[in-house]
Amino acid sequence: MTEWLKTAGIADAELFDGSGLSRKNRCSVASLVKLLAWWRLQKEFKPFVESLPASGADPGTLKRRMTAIKGKVRDKTGHISGVSALSGYVETESGDTMVFSIVVNGGASGSADRMQDTICEILAKAKGD
């Protein structure tokens, strides 16, 4: 997997296990965004993005989150003790797609989730470039 990530330009990933639950896994937020931007250029992008949970939609981890912008966010959540992550794509009012990654260390997951949702709602309201 580390070698495959290098094809996408991700050199700083340290992978310990495949579950994502090990605290030994490491990757910068900038690399997560770079990887998601790389995916947008791949022919498999449509099935990839459609496999991600959509905001406010059932089923999925986002069914109760960001209901005001239902279907505008496609992302992957991640939680381990003291860490909350949300990375993916936001469709803006102008029809553009933004790539984002928000990782909060050392906070309560409920508060971090609400902050992430607010940021995504702000991004979804963006108009123009």
Image: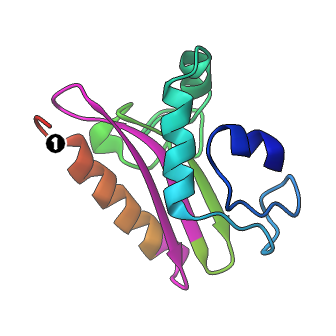
Residue sitting farthest toward the left = 128
**Residue closer to the observer: 119 or 65:** 119
Quarter occupied by residue 3: top right
User: Eyeballing the image, is 82 above or below 114?
Assistant: below
- Circle 1 residue: 126
Q: Measuring 61% from the left and 25% from the top, which residue is drawn there? A: 48
Task: Classify the position of the C terminus by image quarter.
Answer: top left
Q: Decide: is 16 above or below 35.
A: below
Q: Position of residue 96 (x, y in %)?
A: 26, 29
Indicate the amino acid at tag 1: Ala
Query: Is 100 rendered above or below residue 63?
Result: below
Residue 33: % across, % down: 49, 49
- Is residue 1 among the parts visible in the rendering? no
Residue under the point 36% across and 57% down: 117
- Element class at badge 1: loop
Left or right: residue 29 compared with residue 121:
right
Residue 56 in which image quadrant: top left
Magenta segment: 84-110
Residue at the farthest right position: 17
Q: Main secondary structure of the magenta part?
A: strand
Quadrant for residue 80, please give it.
bottom right
Question: Dot 1 surroundings within 10 Å: few (below 14), some, or many (20 or more)?
Answer: some
Question: Could you tell me residue 85's position as x and y percent?
Answer: 55, 62
Name the foreground residue: 40 vs 84: 40
Percent position of residue 110, x then y: 48, 71
